[in-house]
Amino acid sequence: MPGATEPAAGAVTAAGGHRFGPFHRLESPSQTVDVAQLQERSGEIWGRAPYNSHVPKVQAYARPLPEGARGIEFYTDVAVDSGGHPLLVEWSGPRLGVRVENDFAKIRCVITQNTQG
């Protein structure tokens, strides 16, 4: 069975690419109920530069949202950055599939679960 950083089994997008996931983000001061609802409506996840970096990155945990956890679970057509941690994954750019606008990295996604509402 592939991990979240590998294409999901049988998941091929309409454009013939691969869908990666599942990934999840847990409810936090930056992953609020309002942000989760905006992510569902827009089909995008955004991320700022982490504390120890100047490069904007979308960050998430690999694997499904844990049972009983508050957060979102999603899939994306964009592969994670290579060489990173296998369980805490990142998308930085600009590169194919990762836009950088106004100090935010942005990726398109499909949210399959939102337990923050």
Image: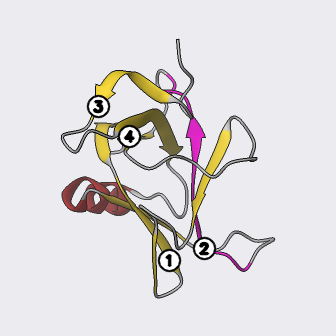
What amino acid type should be assigned to the residue bearing mark 2?
Pro
Element carrying mark 3: strand
Q: Quadrant of residue 53?
A: bottom right
- Viewer-proximal residue among 116 and 16: 16
Check if mark 4's residue and mark 2's residue have beta carbons within 8 Å: no
Q: Which residue is drawn at 49% across and 37% down?
A: 23
Element carrying mark 1: strand
Report the span colored magenta: 54-66
Question: Which of marks 2 and 4 precedes in the sequence?
Answer: 2
Residue position for label 1: 104
Residue position for label 3: 12
What amino acid type should be assigned to the residue bearing mark 4?
Phe
Give me the disc on residue 74: 4
Question: Which of marks 2 and 1 precedes in the sequence?
Answer: 2
Give the alpha-carbon distance from disc 1 to disc 3, as whole Å. 27 Å
Say whether residue 112 is magenta: no
Give me the disc on residue 31: none
Element carrying mark 2: loop
Packing grade of label 3 (10 A; few <14, some 14-19, many >=20) is some
Question: Which of marks 3 and 2 precedes in the sequence?
Answer: 3
Residue position for label 2: 56
Q: In this view, does 12 lie above or below 24?
A: above
